Image (cartoon, rainbow, N blue to C red):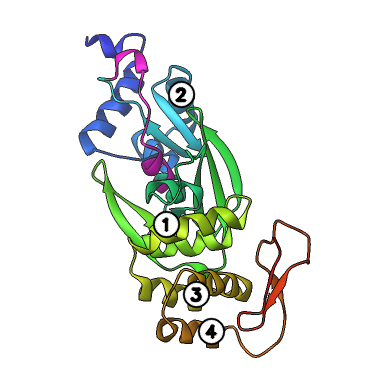
Amino acid sequence: MNNGYKNLSKDEVYLISRVEFEKQKLITTQFVQKLFPDKNKASRVLVFLTQKGRLIRIEKGKYILVPMKAPNQQWMPNEFVVADLWMGDTPYYIGYFTMYNYWGFTEQIPRTIFILNTAKSCKKEICGIRYEAVKIDPGKYYGVEKIKVEDQEVCISDKERTLVDFAYNPLGSMRNFESALPDALNNIDLEKFIRYLIKFPVVSVRKRAGYLLEKSGCQDKLLDPLRKSIGEKRVLVLLDPYNRSRQGKINKEWKIIVNR
């Protein structure tokens, strides 16, 4: 018997062989129960393979197989693939800090894989990597592109959508977004970014981004639609929402308190 199968039962070897033969990325309880109609046996095989380090549990009823060729089970699944398998059919995209770094908007290395989705909010750790599912309104689900990772399609926010998220969630200070903006503007489709901002259902984000775009030298003809999207109400918002001070110059055009 192949050394990789040492200490595995006949049923455990059968499950692994079927998964590898069928090239299953995700192992579900339903799949295992088709192989072993006895539910107790199916459950035991899953538990024992997990204990032996041959399966990685993503959540209840969802597992990833550790390849038999992995030496001493020393193998880590790709984080983006894990995110995709975890979400299943739920609309999602990998975003926030994960993508800020991916697209080069920040050099900060994310410690968590953020998965924005329309179904659930929760945190978990898989193989020592932290994952955070962030539930979003369906109205915020746009600007998503698919990339191939290990022959698996995964969903990420495109550059422009990522920059909108950066304006919304700027790593603890609006200065982080502001300092990233000049370089980012050289690497994005500016008209698309402004369209995405107009579509974003949080008017304060549009105001802050509009003010900073104007400050960065963005042309009025591009900013006019964004300017109109903030409406006529004279509701002032803080440029930096993380700074509670309301002291600062007022920009009437973008209805911003420049609080710094």
Residues 87 and 172: in front is: 172
Mark identifier at residue 214: 3
Mark 2 and mark 3: span between their CA atoms? 55 Å
Pointer 3 local density, CA inside 10 Å: few below 14, some 14–19, many at least 20:
some
Task: Determine the residue positioned at 34% across, 64% down.
Answer: 188
Mark 3 and mark 1: span between their CA atoms? 40 Å
Mark 1: secondary structure: loop
Q: Is residue 72 above or below residue 182?
A: above
Residue beneath disc 4: 227
259 in magenta: no
Residue beneath disc 2: 50
Mark 3 and mark 4: span between their CA atoms? 10 Å
Residues 198 and 65: in front is: 198
Image quadrant assignment for residue 218? bottom left
Residues 95 and 229: in front is: 229
The residue segment tinted magenta is 70-84
Q: Disc 4 residue type?
A: Arg
Task: Determine the residue positioned at 43% across, 68% down.
Answer: 142
Q: Say which label, 4 or 1, has the lower sequence index.
A: 1
Q: Say which label, 2 or 3, has the lower sequence index.
A: 2
Mark 2 and mark 1: span between their CA atoms? 24 Å
Mark 4 and mark 1: span between their CA atoms? 37 Å
Q: Disc 2 residue type?
A: Thr
With 82 as the anchor, is 149 left or right in this view? left
Query: Which percent across, then down, holds residue 159?
Result: 37, 60
Image quadrant assignment for residue 170? bottom right
Residue beneath disc 1: 89
Pointer 2 local density, CA inside 10 Å: few below 14, some 14–19, many at least 20:
some
Q: Disc 3 residue type?
A: Glu
